[in-house]
Amino acid sequence: MFDEMRPVEDLVTALKTPINLAESTSISRTSNSVSLAAGTQIRINDGYVLTVKPQGVEVSHTEGYNPYDQRAYLKAQQMADSLAALLRNAGGTRDRIANTGEEHQWVTQGITDVLSYLGIDTNKDFYVNGMKYSTNSKGYFESAAAAEAQEAYERQKAANRTYEFADEKTRKQIAHMSDYYLSTAPKEVKAAWQAALEETGINPFPNGYHSVLQQLAMEQDFMTGGNDNIFGNTLESSMDAVDRILDRIANPPGEVTEEKSAFVEQEKEFYQALKEKLELLS
């Protein structure tokens, strides 16, 4: 779920996959839970009936409906589509109930309306086909599985900002970036860099942050017309590069946001450790 989804492609796949429904229908207002099986019918106002099917939720009508009340039909269709999205999510065939903020609002209202006919109170935690749902900070319904996955994603995202706890993919990214910027540096400089990574446990290239090294390399590339080799091929040029990085950290060209300030402190710690190791070699 928390690798970025491709909403259109994923939705097409979800709609082609039968919904995993309950074996039988049951409602418990005590536990605020409902289980819906194929064939379940929900009678709503204005003469409409929603029928749960493995392919989705179908809208039909009784003799008492008004064929000229377009608003009532659209409301019934909203409830049907919203319930189908909820059931797909509960059954694991759709990762998100909705993708955009506008769609979340529309689906949230539809779910609230249809579940009210079953006596389910969506103002508090509720269960649909065994899946627990709560209202998140944005006011949208979120499954317990989604909340747990999001928490795990945020924990790994934070871990990937370090070297010590980064996952294998991030470790490979760090190695690739390190090899690129140190491509011509002496072996002892590369060894000092690796030692600084391991001792500080800091990732100097975390996703979502533009490091000073990357910024200085781009500036040099622009000024020289293609040379972004900051570290050069000697111990002295490498030490000069580290000094330039530390000077830029101490004297940023613009305001450092509160969010980035924590990384800047880590960046400073890493390059100070690297500088100390290079000084021992000189």
Image: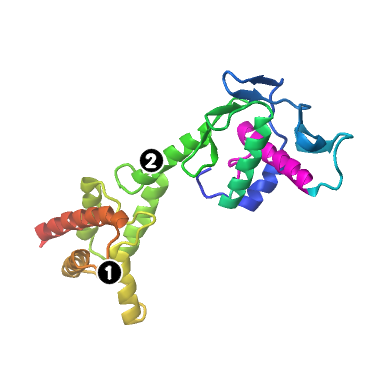
Judge from the rendering whether residue 226 lies leftward or rightward of residue 202; answer left or right.
right
Judge from the rendering whether residue 141 lies leftward or rightward of residue 187; answer left or right.
right
> Does residue 110 show up?
yes
Disc 1 target residue:
254
Judge from the rendering whether residue 131 lies leftward or rightward of residue 41; answer left or right.
left
Depth order, front residue of 3/276: 3
Depth order, front residue of 2/47: 47
Judge from the rendering whether residue 272 lies leftward or rightward of residue 126; answer left or right.
left
What residue span does the magenta drawing correspond to?
Answer: 71-98
In the rendered image, residue 138, in percent from the top left (x then y), is placed at 49, 45
In the rendered image, residue 142, in percent from the top left (x then y), is placed at 53, 37
> Does residue 93 show up?
no
Q: What's the residue at 31%, 81% (across, down)?
A: 223
Compared with 52, 4 (above or below) is below
Q: What's the residue at 66%, 40% (across, down)?
A: 110
Residue 237 falls in image quadrant: bottom left
The amino acid type, in three-letter code, at marker 2 is Arg
